[in-house]
Amino acid sequence: MDKNKYVGICKVGEKGQIVIPKEVRTMYDIKPGDSIVLLCDTKKGIALVKSDFIENLTDKIL
């Protein structure tokens, strides 16, 4: 499988929490305390984006 892609399954816990698999945390350098932006669209689905990416994008726009 391509090192830049990941397919897996996450279970939703009783409190509605999910665990981001270690392989994905490593791919995106996600560490404890990092902020993740949740993007949702009822037709397109859910996306998780590391907040650093959004901040960099905002800086480029402004």
Image: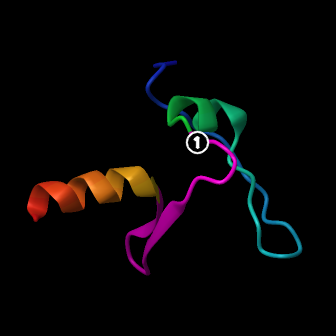
- Horizontal arrangement in the rendering, residue 60 relative to residue 29 (left or right): left
Does residue 62 sit above or below 2 in this rendering? below
Does residue 59 sit above or below 8 in this rendering? below
Residue that badge 1 annotates? 30
What residue is shown at x 70% (from left), y 34% (from top)? 22
Q: Residue furthest bottom?
A: 42
* Residue 13 highlighted magenta (yes or no): no
Q: Find residue 33 and report its image quarter.
A: bottom right
Which one is nearer the viewer's eye here, 45 or 4?
4
Q: Position of residue 41 (x, y in %)?
A: 40, 77
Which one is nearer the viewer's eye here, 32 or 14?
32
What residue is shown at x 61% (from left), y 38% (from top)? 25
Q: Secondary structure at mark 1?
A: loop
How many circles with numbers are drawn on the protein? Answer: 1
* Residue 35 highlighted magenta (yes or no): yes
What's the residue type where badge 1 is placed?
Answer: Ile
Q: Residues within 10 Å of mark 1 (few under 14, many from 20)?
A: some
What residue is shown at x 26% (from left), y 51% (from top)? 56
What residue is shown at x 19% (from left), y 57% (from top)? 59
- Write down the region rendered in magenta: 30-48
